[in-house]
Amino acid sequence: MIRVHVVTGGFPPGSNAGHDMDYARLRLLQLLQEQPGMLTTVANNFNDIQTWLPGSRLLMTYVAGPFLTDAQSDYVQQWLDDGGRWLALHGTSGGKAARLENGRRKMVKTRHHEALGSFFLNHPPLSKFQVRVTDASHPLTRGLPASFEVVDELYLIELQDPATSHILLTTELARDPSPAGFGFSYDEDTSVLPDGVTRVLGYTRSQGKGGVAYIALGHCHSRSTNRQPVVDPSVSATGDVPLKFRGAWESEPFEQLLRNGIKWGSGQE
């Protein structure tokens, strides 16, 4: 029997934080159910992580707001050293946001991001973009096309240790096209690679006997959880935001990524 712990939730506790957490949780549980011999526990945040990780082989996270405290980060890193694997999705690279004097918000880097290996800066409005697979031989990308198109939030993430990060997915974006005042504020765009155009959307990072895999894709919302004020013209010429949005979740490559990630994380690959 393989134990898997799934964390899906927003902040403050009980909040959806602009995502359809019920849908994301259900889809992850459905994908886990496909695999034989899985025993799954579920939480809404990391508060009781030290209760559920002992004996767990895989930690899966889809969160918007909850993040590991310093002590929890140390605990998770030790769990990784001992052989655990963490499959982190979408908003897991976010966390705490500080309110600025101008009313904008700015993400705060914490030890959570050190453990994860990446830090979220911002995302432009929902848009259509190409995802490129940079290593088709890795277990996480097995069976994927060389590139595929998604409609999603294009996350701008800063790698915390590029030298130890094995990049699997990228896209090209020369500059953040967010309208003035949209999203989160940041001092410098540290998410672009040295070529000035490539952005990382997925990577793995080894730690001890275990490791982390992060995939930035996966926004979803319902009519009641939507916080998108506007979308890119590539999604809607009128700028109207879809009342129900599933995006990458309804694409075969993303589903394949998740299935591969579960096999990688549970030691089946």
Image (spheres, rainbow, N blue to C red):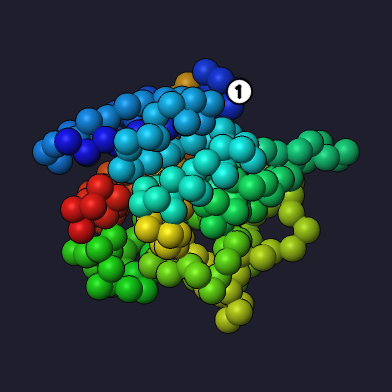
Q: What is the tally of numbered marks visible in this picture?
A: 1
Q: Residue at x 78, y 58 (%)?
A: 187
In the foreground, 243 or 69 = 69
Question: Which quadrant is the C terminus positioned in?
Answer: bottom left
Q: Can you give x and y, in whole percent of width and height, for residue 112 in the image? A: 59, 45
Would residue 43 be found to the left or right of residue 33 on screen?
right
Residues packed near mark 1 inside 10 Å, few (<14), some (14 to 19) or many (20 plus): few
In the foreground, 88 or 190 = 88
Q: Is residue 223 above or below residue 143?
A: above
Q: Can you give x and y, in whole percent of width and height, for residue 47 in the image? A: 53, 26
**Does residue 220 show up?**
no
> Identity of the amino acid at label 1?
Pro
**Does residue 224 show up?**
yes
Residue pointed to by mark 1: 12
List the single residue furthest toward the top: 14
In the foreground, 43 or 197 = 43
Q: Is residue 15 above or below residue 108?
A: above
List the single residue furthest toward the right: 101
List the single residue furthest toward the bottom: 195
Q: Residue at x 58, y 81 (%)?
A: 195
Q: Can you give x and y, in whole percent of width and height, for residue 242 in the image? A: 43, 36
Q: Is residue 161 above or below residue 67?
A: below
Q: Can you give x and y, in whole percent of width and height, for residue 101 in the image? A: 88, 38
Q: Residue at x 17, y 36 (%)?
A: 1
Would residue 26 be found to the left or right of residue 220 on screen?
left
Q: Residue at x 40, y 35 (%)?
A: 53
Would residue 52 be found to the left or right of residue 136 on screen?
right
Q: Secondary structure at mark 1?
A: loop
